[in-house]
Amino acid sequence: MTLARVAQHAHVSVSTVSRYLRGQLKVNPETAERIDAAVRELGYEAPPSAAPPPAPENSPVVALIVPDLVNPFFAELAEEIAATAAASGVALVVGVTGQQARRESSLSELVARTEAVDGMIYVGIHRRNPRLVKAISGGLPVVVLDEEIADTSRADAISVDNYGGAYQATAYLAQLGHRRIAHVAGPPELSTSRDRLRGYREAMEHAGLPVDEALVLHGPYTEQFGASTFPYLTGAAEPPTAVFAGSDIVAVGMLSAAGLHGLRIPEDLSVVGCDGIRVGEWLRPKLTTLQQPVADLARSALDLVQARIEDPGGERVTRVFPLHLVIRGSATAPAT
């Protein structure tokens, strides 16, 4: 009889059973009863090495998986989650995937197999991760944060209103008087990209403006992609006077490279980004952007994963936070 069978029978993760039986984790009475019942019914006997004296603290251990720490948004999100975890007495371990699907998959499996980890906050950059799905099915408490991941409907999920934010940003540019508005979007398969593109299209439609498909560009959320867009934008039959960029780091690349193409920001091209990373305040001009509620995302993710560790059988929770437009100097009315 293995610990995994006990966990499966009790509908909790292996790490939850292991730490509960060692006296290192306090769970709610209903969960404790399910584990105790599974131990009795299956006749499980813990080996001596698996039953050390109770640990001095009962804090849970949570794994945070992020795509990278190069993009300031992911770095700030990880920093906020780490600070919130420390203040809450939660032990946090961080895994970085380098935006590689293979590493997202292998880290998901590693966390699921590690008894010392009680739950996971997962920030992915690829639409599919079968090993993550398997980990969730196996009882690992998981909160999916930011991007929507296919087949993870059993996991708690936290996101922002990407559609509403994109609509707000595009409508703001239209209100300034821009009629040729481009959208530099993220990878087309990602939920954030799709929702922001939809918000952009509907805002253009409601403003009575046509969408020039030549001015809708898809690429990775990187500074290099933003810098590489100018030949396509300036080479259009009717170049845009404004751009809504689906990521601040993309907008940073655009502001950095604009001068190389003879453009001034915002006199020749207005730019609005999305994420609200701190570096946007250091640019000249300062970046107009959609602000992500990073502190709320971090607090909510930790609250949910802790609640799921204590009560694996609770109803699935989804939370959506708004994006707020922060007006700075990178967008202005078009030149007449």
Image: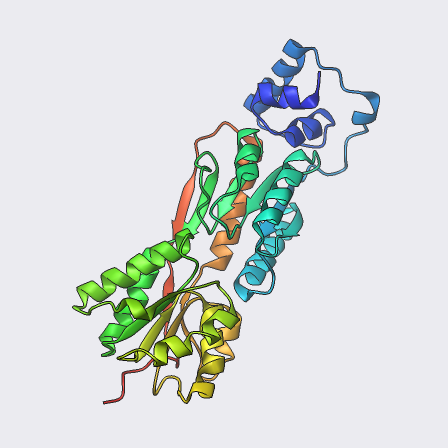
Return the residue nearer the eye: 316 or 28.
Answer: 316
Could you tell me residue 265's position as x and y percent? 39, 84
Which residue is painted at 48% across and 53% down in the image? 297
Return the residue nearer the eye: 326 or 174.
Answer: 174
Furthest residue to the left?
208
Relative placement, left or right, of 95 versus 217 is right
Residue 64 visible in the picture: no
Relative placement, left or right, of 177 versus 134 is left
Q: Quadrant of the N terminus?
A: top right
Which residue is painted at 41% across and 52% down in the image? 189
Relative placement, left or right, of 305 versus 94 is left
Does 111 sit above or below residue 273? above
Which residue is painted at 39% across and 87% down in the image? 263
Residue 220 visible in the picture: yes
Does 180 sit above or below residue 135? below
Relative placement, left or right, of 203 versus 309 is left
Return the residue nearer the eye: 58 or 279.
Answer: 279
Could you tell me residue 272's position as x and y percent? 37, 73
Which residue is painted at 44% across and 83% down in the image? 258
What colour scheme has been applied to the protein in the rendered image? rainbow
| Count of marks placed on residues | 0
Image quarter for residue 174?
bottom left
Does 90 sit above or below residue 21? below
Furthest residue to the right?
48
Could you tell me residue 95's position as x and y percent? 65, 50
Could you tell me residue 250's position as x and y percent? 46, 70
Q: Quadrant of the C terminus?
A: bottom left
